[in-house]
Amino acid sequence: MIQRIQSIFLLLAGGASLGLFGLPIATPPQAIDNSMIFGDALYNVNDQVGLSVLFGLAGALSIIAIFLFRNRGLQSKVSLSALILNIGGLVFAIYYLAENLTEAGKAVVEFAFGGAFPILAVFFCFLAYRFIKKDDKLVRSMDRLR
């Protein structure tokens, strides 16, 4: 059913992944001239094509997985793929940020509200995957009783 708890978690994961396109991940107090990502004083997923692709695919897969409720096996695989893409995007975002901070010198960078979204997306994808597996286990146990 579409009203299951994993559908809510998948919707939240998709919202967190796609919400990164509107919110910055980190901001310095002023623009840094010699930095690739802080030239506009914002670090968001649009600064790197790889981040846009990873989080865009993860968000799309999370939303698509909501409507695969009749095929729990496929829903599980799609949500696991979204989880892996979110983890990959999180690692890549941190790596790219650390790499550009060393080039920018001793600039002070503050994490913005969007910096929590990749972590929330990973958390919600994990919970959705866990509840899909739990639901599948429940259905299999009911089939055994028949």
Image: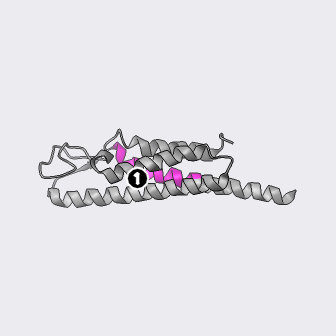
Q: Tell whether position 30 is magenta.
A: no
Image coordinates of residue 59 in percent, x first then y, are 47, 46
Which quadrant is home to the N terminus? top right
Residue in front for this viewpoint, 129 or 50? 50
Q: Amino acid at mark 1?
A: Leu
Question: Residue at left 75%, top 54%?
Answer: 139
Question: Residue at left 42%, top 47%?
Answer: 56
Image coordinates of residue 136 in percent, x first then y, are 70, 56
Q: Which residues are magenta?
A: 113-128
Image coordinates of residue 39 in percent, x first then y, are 17, 46
Q: Tell whether position 115 is magenta.
A: yes
Q: Residue furthest right?
A: 146
Q: Which residue is mark 1?
A: 54
Residue in front for this viewpoint, 26 or 77? 77
Image coordinates of residue 71 in percent, x first then y, are 67, 51
Question: Residue at left 24%, top 44%?
Answer: 42
Check disc 1 and report its element: helix, strand or loop.
helix
Quick one: label 1, few (<14), some, or many (20+) residues within 10 Å?
many
All told, the count of numbered labels is: 1
Q: Residue furthest left?
A: 33
The chosen color scheme is one colour
Horizontal arrangement in the rendering, residue 107 relative to residue 111 (left or right): left
Q: Main secondary structure of the magenta part?
A: helix
Residue in front for this viewpoint, 112 or 7? 7
Which quadrant is home to the C terminus? bottom right
